[in-house]
Image (cartoon, rainbow, N blue to C red):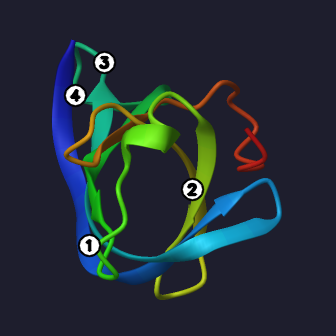
C-alpha cells in the first residue's frame, strides 16, 4: 500500500490518560494517508507517527503501551500509544467513523 504525508505538526500539548491530565509535552507528528492503487485516499488507512518529549524531565518508560490521548496545541485530540522510552508514538484508528473516540 502506498502512503502520502498529509500533515506535519509540532508544538506544545498535553498528555491525557482517559480524562486525567498527565502533564505537558512537546510533540512532533506526521499524518500519513493510505492510498488505493488508483491514487485515491483510503479512509481506513490513516496513520499518525511521531514523538513526545517531556519538558520537565519526565520519562515515558511507565507509559509504554498505554492507550493515551495527545491534545494538540490547536485543541484537537488524537489517540496514541508510546512505543519506547525515547517517546516514539504511533496510532492507527480502530474504526472508520471519524469520531476520534478510539
Locate residue 100 relative to residue 5 in the image: left or right.
Answer: right
Determine which residue is flagged by label 1: 9
- 62 lies above or below 83: below
Instruction: Give the spatial CA distance, label 2 vs label 3.
Output: 24 Å
Determine which residue is flagged by label 4: 39
Q: Tell me if label 1 and label 3 are in contact, CB under 8 Å.
A: no
Question: Would you identify the image quadrant in which residue 56 lies?
Answer: bottom left
In which quadrant is the N terminus drawn? top left
- The numbered disc on residue 78 is 2
Instruction: Give the spatial CA distance, label 1 vs label 4.
Output: 24 Å
Instruction: Give the spatial CA distance, label 1 vs label 3.
Output: 25 Å
Mark 3 crowd level (few <14, some 14–19, many ≥20, 10 Å Cα): few
Instruction: Give the spatial CA distance, label 1 vs label 2.
Output: 13 Å
Q: Tell me if label 1 and label 4 are in contact, CB under 8 Å.
A: no
Q: Tell me if label 4 and label 3 are in contact, CB under 8 Å.
A: yes
Give the mark nearer the N terminus: 1 vs 4: 1
Q: Secondary structure at mark 1?
A: strand
Give the mark nearer the N terminus: 1 vs 2: 1
Give the mark nearer the N terminus: 1 vs 3: 1
- Image x and y of residue 9, in percent: 26, 72
Mark 4 crowd level (few <14, some 14–19, many ≥20, 10 Å Cα): few
Mark 2 crowd level (few <14, some 14–19, many ≥20, 10 Å Cα): some
Q: Residue at x 34, y 31 (%)?
A: 83
Q: Residue at x 65, y 24 (%)?
A: 94
Mark 1 crowd level (few <14, some 14–19, many ≥20, 10 Å Cα): few
- 48 lies above or below 78: above
Determine which residue is flagged by label 3: 36
Give the mark nearer the N terminus: 4 vs 2: 4
Amino acid at each position: 500500500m502506498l502512503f502520502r504525508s498529509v500533515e506535519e505538526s509540532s508544538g506544545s500539548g498535553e498528555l491525557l490518560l482517559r480524562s486525567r491530565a498527565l502533564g505537558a509535552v512537546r510533540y512532533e507528528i506526521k499524518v500519513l494517508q493510505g492510498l488505493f492503487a488508483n491514487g485515491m485516499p483510503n479512509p481506513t488507512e490513516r496513520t499518525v507517527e511521531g514523538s513526545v518529549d517531556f519538558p520537565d524531565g519526565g520519562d515515558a518508560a511507565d507509559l509504554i503501551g498505554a492507550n493515551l490521548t495527545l491534545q494538540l496545541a490547536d485543541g484537537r485530540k488524537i489517540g496514541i500509544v508510546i512505543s519506547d522510552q525515547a517517546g516514539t508514538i504511533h496510532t492507527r484508528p480502530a474504526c472508520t467513523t471519524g469520531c476520534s473516540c478510539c
